[in-house]
Amino acid sequence: MKAVLIDRPGDETVLRIGDAPDPVLGPGELRLRVAATAVNRADLLQRQGMYPPPPGASSILGLECAGTVVEIGAGVTGWKPGDRAMALLAGGGYAEQVVVHAGSALRVPERLSLEEAAAIPEVFLTAFLNLFEVGGLCAGGRALVHGGGSGVGTASIQLAKAAGARILVTAGSEDKCTRCLELGADAAIDYRSENFAERVREETGGRGVDVVLDSIGAKYFESNLACLAMGGRLVLIGLMGGAKVEANLAVLLARRLHVIGSTLRARPVEEKAAIVAAFERRFGADLAAGRVRPVVDRVLPLEQVAAAHRSMKASEHFGKIVLKVG
Ligand SMILES: NC(=O)c1ccc[n+]([C@@H]2O[C@H](COP(=O)([O-])OP(=O)(O)OC[C@H]3O[C@@H](n4cnc5c(N)ncnc54)[C@H](OP(=O)(O)O)[C@@H]3O)[C@@H](O)[C@H]2O)c1
């Protein structure tokens, strides 16, 4: 099969299209003919050799895809060849074929194209898991999400609104802030020109938010704690702003705060299946009705994977960059 290959870690120029062996189908798995995949920030790290795939996962980049089921592994029920599926992957999405545990696959709603569907699994499941299951966000609750214009951010805004919560986001330009507001954010803070912790306090009448979903890490640690309400949860999902902190832990005690680290990729397939099932139960109808939808910035052919990575590195995108494979 055709796939994006990397001979050595490096910048975008190491990405090349080549031939890779077809993945081997195991029990409990589906083989998909991939129509589209999407770029995630983690792919840029993996390309540079800084985020190796978990044991047993494909070394090919790509954490999500959408396509057509072409083969069913032993013991799989509920799927048949020809079904349209979108899937959360531990790797391997930048290729013509993937095999995936059936529990990591979701049906593609009729109204969506496979290119749109490819933009859903990684960021919607990350937003769902960390805002609600890990972060405990409830109807009437409040959340702050950094990078409102990111894949995870655009998913978070919509899921939080669908759940009846209030959502504040940060973004790096006036234009991105405007687009976050149009998507449903209650407040969008331009972190380049405003102090987000002060703005969060103002927007919440001094109370703070219940959950901060943070992909920045060290640079924002103390400001994130300052944004939290009594008993609030800081859910750390990325380290774009560094990993090492020196902080005053007294605020954790005084306001009974929780700091939680969370990753999706390396979880066992059984846990991923439970997350997928819980997401479908809670938001499947919203997705099917178009109340919640993927935000696709652009669709590029797989051959333009290097350009896609360059755009993401420069944060030129709003939402997802999709790669058309088929
Ligand atoms: N732990 C997990 O399981 C998990 C799963 C998926 C994703 N993630 C993480 O979640 C983050 C988002 O992923 P993604 O694929 O959605 O990325 P993405 O679309 O590339 O978005 C990241 C965005 O963050 C914004 N940003 C950069 N520095 C910022 C800062 N100091 N303050 C606020 N925003 C800032 C940038 O936009 P602007 O600066 O232009 O606003 C950038 O576009 C990444 O760190 C990724 O590794 C973690």
Image (spheres, grey):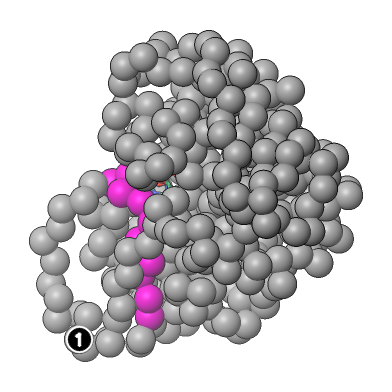
For residue 305, above or below residue 250: above
Q: Would you say residue 151 is visible in this rendering? A: no
For residue 176, above or below residue 156: above
Q: In the rendered view, does 41 fall on the left or right side of 249?
A: right
Q: Position of residue 53 (x, y in %)?
A: 37, 39
Q: Which residue is mark 1?
A: 253
The quadrant holding residue 35 is top right
The answer to whether residue 237 is magenta is yes
Q: In the rendered view, does 145 fall on the left or right side of 230?
A: right
Three-letter amino acid code at the position of disc 1: Leu
Q: Toward the viewer: 188 or 3?
A: 3
Q: Residue at x 58, y 25 (%)?
A: 22
Label 1 crowd (10 A; few <14 / some 14-19 / many >=20):
few
Q: Position of residue 154 (x, y in %)?
A: 61, 52
Q: Toward the viewer: 187 or 11?
A: 11
Q: Quadrant of the N terminus?
A: top right
Q: Toward the viewer: 239 or 146?
A: 239
Q: Residue at x 48, y 25 (%)?
A: 309
Q: Quadrant of the C terminus?
A: top right
- Ligand 1 neighbours mark 1 (CB distance < 8 Å): no
- Point out the stretch of residues depicted in magenta: 232-241
Q: Position of residue 225 (x, y in %)?
A: 29, 71
Secondary structure of the residue carrying numbered label 1: helix
Q: Toward the viewer: 29 or 132?
A: 29
